[in-house]
Image (cartoon, helix red, strand yellow):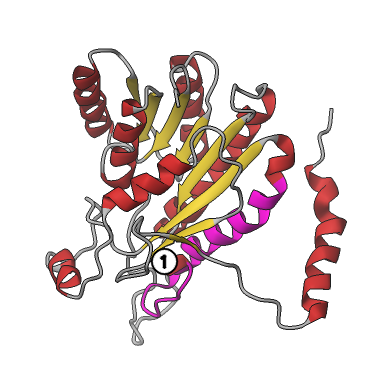
């Protein structure tokens, strides 16, 4: 299957999962613009991949995903660099948990919480998705029949709560909820939206512990990057999958690809399902086209 002539926008492309996704896309003949707060790192990745490909297939732009104006400016630059159309958007930029609220019982007054993890991992993803959806709605379907596709990254910690990671989990659970809800609405507009939910992947993300990966590896908790890339690749082209979360659990799951489609929670009562259908019918009008 040929993807020549298609284009993609990847946030966080200077490192980690986003960098690996960018490389995979380039090998498929897709032209990519990577956005990262680390401009030098993004430019270095672009230069490296361009040299390997022997063509100018990757461009880079500096973007702070937690800042709306920065996201808009970066996305507009990407549209120009990619010839006016974007087929795939990958909101992948993220950071690890930080101390959001210091435990200081003797402190007087009140301290504003540090919500930077929410800003990047939650709001930042929604900002990128909103830009993608607006751009896709202006585009005609491509040769595969889609206006555009979004594949973002949540985490297994967006499926299973970790008590000491409240803000990270809140953001990642939020991404899962967004994908499972709006991802089922968007296909009528020829747009798809899915999420990857990996366990621990060896990346450059700052965990704050030098032995994090070594201990995780001994516990058999590491997920191979190749598994994520296989899932990302499966969504290219004509795949109609949308509103799904790919879980990459540690250990043997019986799937050689290393991932499963994580089912949504079962309804507790028949009325629970009726409630969901009713609420959907009452709010669907908010997403209808307006002049």
The answer to whether residue 6 is magenta is no
Image side of residue 224 versus residue 186, left or right: left
From the viewer's perspective, is residue 110 above or below residue 106?
above
**Label 1 neighbourhood size at 10 Å, few (<14), some (14-19), many (20+)?**
many
Q: Give the range drawn in magenta.
A: 159-185
Query: Residue 75 appears at what percent x and percent y?
Result: 49, 28
Q: On the image, numbered disc 1 is attached to which residue? A: 156
Q: Which of 84 and 233 is in front in this view?
A: 233
Q: Which quarter of the image is occupied by the N terminus? A: top left
Q: Which quarter of the image is occupied by the C terminus? A: top right
User: Which residue is located at x 62 percent, y 36 percent?
Assistant: 133
User: Which residue is located at x 34 percent, y 81 percent?
Assistant: 103
Disc 1, SS: helix
Q: Can residue 128 be seen in this view?
A: no
Query: Residue 261 appears at what percent x and percent y?
Result: 51, 60
Residue at the farthest bottom position: 105
From the viewer's perspective, is residue 121 above or below residue 43?
below
Query: Residue 280 appears at what percent x and percent y?
Result: 80, 59
User: Which residue is located at x 20 percent, y 64 percent?
Assistant: 208
Q: Nearer the viewer, residue 74 or 11?
A: 11
Q: Nearer the viewer, residue 168 or 281?
A: 281
Decide whether the magenta segment is chiefly helix, strand or loop. helix
Which quarter of the figure has residue 117?
bottom left
């Amino acid at each position: 299957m040929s993807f020549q002539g298609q284009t993609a926008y990847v946030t966080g492309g200077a490192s980690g999962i986003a960098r690996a996704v960018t490389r995979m896309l380039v090998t498929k003949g897709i032209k990519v613009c990577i956005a990262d707060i680390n401009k030098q790192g993004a430019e270095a990745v672009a230069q490296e991949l361009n040299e390997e490909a022997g063509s100018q297939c990757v461009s880079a732009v500096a973007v702070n995903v937690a800042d709306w104006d920065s996201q808009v400016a970066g996305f507009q630059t990407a549209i120009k660099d990619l010839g006016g159309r974007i087929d795939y958007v990958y909101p992948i930029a993220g950071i690890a948990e930080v101390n959001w609220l210091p435990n200081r019982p003797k402190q007087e007054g009140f301290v504003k919480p540090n919500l930077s993890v929410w800003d990047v991992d939650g709001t930042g993803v929604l900002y990128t998705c909103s830009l993608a959806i607006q751009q896709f709605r202006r585009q005609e379907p491509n040769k595969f029949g889609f206006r555009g596709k979004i594949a973002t990254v949540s985490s297994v910690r967006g499926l299973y709560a970790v008590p000491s990671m409240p803000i990270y989990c809140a953001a990642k659970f939020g991404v899962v909820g967004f994908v499972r809800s709006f991802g089922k609405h968007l296909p009528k507009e020829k747009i798809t939206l899915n999420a990857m939910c990996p366990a621990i992947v060896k990346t450059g993300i700052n965990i704050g512990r030098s032995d994090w990966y070594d201990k995780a590896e001994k516990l058999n908790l590491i997920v191979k990057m190749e598994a994520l890339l296989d899932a990302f690749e499966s969504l290219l082209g004509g795949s109609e999958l949308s509103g799904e979360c790919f879980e990459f659990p540690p250990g043997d799951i019986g799937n050689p690809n290393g991932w499963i489609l994580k089912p949504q929670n079962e309804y507790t009562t028949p009325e629970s399902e009726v409630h969901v259908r009713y609420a959907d019918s009452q709010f669907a009008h908010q997403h209808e086209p307006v002049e």
